Amino acid sequence: MKQTFRCHTISPGYATGEALLSRDPVLFYQTDFTTGVFREPGHDLEGKCIAGKIIIFPGGKGSSVVQADGMYKLDTAGLAPCGLIVSCLDTVLVSSAIIMEIPMVDDVDPLFYERVKEGDHIILDATGGTITIDCPESQ
């Protein structure tokens, strides 16, 4: 069963991938740039690989230099997330997503946050302004 929700485009593009959820803001510099594993102690994403995932999180944190550098290093290593769904925008995160051409959205239908679960298959059409949770029939 598919469930589709509206959202607002920040960085256009299309991505499909596994949902990775975090209640904590993300500083991409806290990722191992050789494995894509998030390493910030005590963070929701600690020990999880973010490469190729669609990350659903409040927003970014940290200084502009380290946030942008972290995204750049992940992107050049082929370990960047494939999509970003945020609730709070910051200019560095927005700029980084646009420069790295990572689809990014905000202003998501609140029902999406009630329905999405870690590991769900997500179809993010940032250009068209939709997010689809592609759930197996058994859910």
Image: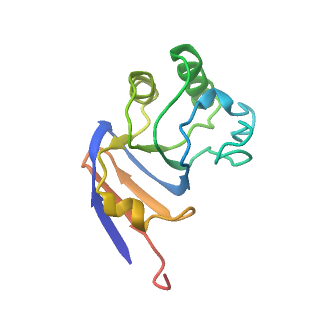
Q: Position of residue 51 (x, y in %)?
A: 62, 44
Q: Is residue 26 left or right of residue 98?
A: right
Q: Position of residue 91 (x, y in %)?
A: 38, 22
Q: Coloring scheme of the render? A: rainbow
Q: Is residue 17 left or right of residue 5?
A: right
- Residue at 56 percent across and 42 percent down: it is 24
| Location of residue 92 (image quadrant) | top left
> In this view of the protein, which residue sits in the foreground, 110 or 82?
110
Up-down relation of residue 87 to residue 63 (above or below): below
Q: Quadrant of the N terminus?
A: bottom left
- Residue at 64 percent across and 48 percent down: it is 44
> In this view of the protein, which residue sits in the foreground, 86 or 127?
86
Residue found at the far bottom of this picture: 138
| Location of residue 46 (image quadrant) | top right
Q: Position of residue 94 (x, y in %)?
A: 39, 28
| Location of residue 95 (image quadrant) | top left
